[in-house]
């Protein structure tokens, strides 16, 4: 048996060729194996690792070395300071999507000065990370969250239940918007749709490791975004807001599509922390 400190050092060294953050990954895998927080590992470097958890850790390490994404091995991932269940049926939440959530929450809080409920559509909800984060942080909202994948919706439902907001989110299997359409328009529409061009996706390391359905945006990466922008003007309430995550190279094209779809709206692009185009904002006047 080896101690915690030695195990972490050896595992991190082993993972250096497979990870940009080997020390962190080693800690996360061992914490997952022992069902302990990372802080416990730091506080107990001398603790011995018994044969059974050592074998489980070895199995996790081999999965990571084989190319399986760490969040799927852990079964969870953090997004907007919340822990979300993730499975191979859903896209792993990315930090850049937090820009969309930040702007949506800020707008919702400003708009809801009277404390009245208003309706949000989260299109292509996946793990539910956007819908759940909004519901947790803005108690007045009611969310309709859609996805074409029934398996993804099952994961999203569990995440809503985990965070105590399942009563304010309706999950529907749909190709973009619900069918039949909502009888009343949405005050806010959010979407992080597949936006990677097919030919590009097939050359990326994530191809085959995360669900293609959540990544493949068609020939130019804009197939679903184009369809959403065609439908959205009929579904967005006066004074409403649409926030749509895009791929960094799609800014000009997304602006053109939005301007063609909305005759009277304020339309802006926002950049992520790396200074790349990441978020399309459409605000009805």
Image (cartoon, rainbow, N blue to C red):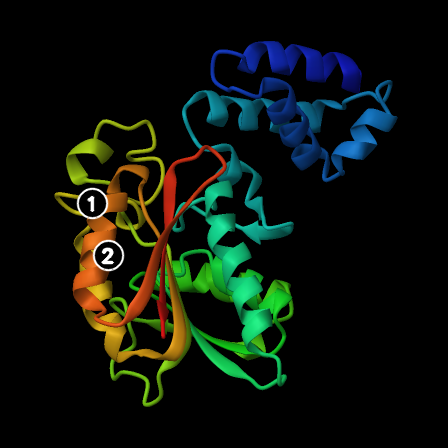
Q: Can residue 176 be seen by looking at this rendering?
A: yes
Disc 2 vs disc 1: Cβ atoms closer than 8 Å?
yes
Task: Tell me the residue that label 2 is attached to.
Answer: 225
Give the position of the C terminus as an image quadrant.
bottom left
Secondary structure beneath label 1? loop
- Position of residue 104 relative to residue 214, above or below, is below
Which is more toward the observer, 1 or 95? 95
Q: Quadrant of residue 226?
A: bottom left
State the image coordinates of residue 85 (x, y, percent, origin top left).
55, 52
Q: Quadrant of residue 265?
A: bottom left
Q: Can residue 86 be seen by looking at this rendering?
A: no
Secondary structure beneath label 2? helix
State the image coordinates of residue 3 (x, y, percent, origin top left).
80, 16
* Marks 2/1: CA–CA distance: 8 Å
- Position of residue 147 relative to residue 256, above or below, is below
Q: Residue at x 16, y 63 (%)?
A: 260
Task: Tell me the residue that label 1 is attached to.
Answer: 221
State the image coordinates of residue 34 (x, y, percent, origin top left).
72, 34
Which is more toward the observer, 139 or 169? 139
Residue at the bottom extreme of this rendering: 183
- Position of residue 93 relative to residue 11, above or below, is below
């Amino acid at each position: 048996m080896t101690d915690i400190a030695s195990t972490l050092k050896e595992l991190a060294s082993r993972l250096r060729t497979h990870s940009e953050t080997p020390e962190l990954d080693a800690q996360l895998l061992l914490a997952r194996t022992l069902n302990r927080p990372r802080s416990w590992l730091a506080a107990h470097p001398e603790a011995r690792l018994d044969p059974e958890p050592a074998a489980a850790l070895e199995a996790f390490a081999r999965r990571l070395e084989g190319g399986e994404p760490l969040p799927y091995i852990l079964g969870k991932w953090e997004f907007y300071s919340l822990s979300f269940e993730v499975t191979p049926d859903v896209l792993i939440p990315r930090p850049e999507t937090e820009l969309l959530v930040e702007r949506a929450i800020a707008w919702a809080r400003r708009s809801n000065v009277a404390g009245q409920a208003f309706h949000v559509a989260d299109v292509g909800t996946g793990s539910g990370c956007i819908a759940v984060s909004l519901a947790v942080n803005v108690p007045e909202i009611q969310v309709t969250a859609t996805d074409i994948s029934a398996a993804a919706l099952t994961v999203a439902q569990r995440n809503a239940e985990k965070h105590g907001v399942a009563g304010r989110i309706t999950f529907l299997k749909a190709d973009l918007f619900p069918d039949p359409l909502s009888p009343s328009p949405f005050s806010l529409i959010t979407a992080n749709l597949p936006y990677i061009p097919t030919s590009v996706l097939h050359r990326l390391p994530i191809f085959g490791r995360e669900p293609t359905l959540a990544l493949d945006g068609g020939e130019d990466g804009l197939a679903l975004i184009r369809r959403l922008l065609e439908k959205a003007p009929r579904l967005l309430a006066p004074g409403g807001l649409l926030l749509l995550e895009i791929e960094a190279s799609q800014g000009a094209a997304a602006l053109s599509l939005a301007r063609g779809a909305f005759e009277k709206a304020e339309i802006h692009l926002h950049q992520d922390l790396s200074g790349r185009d990441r978020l399309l904002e459409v605000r009805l006047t």
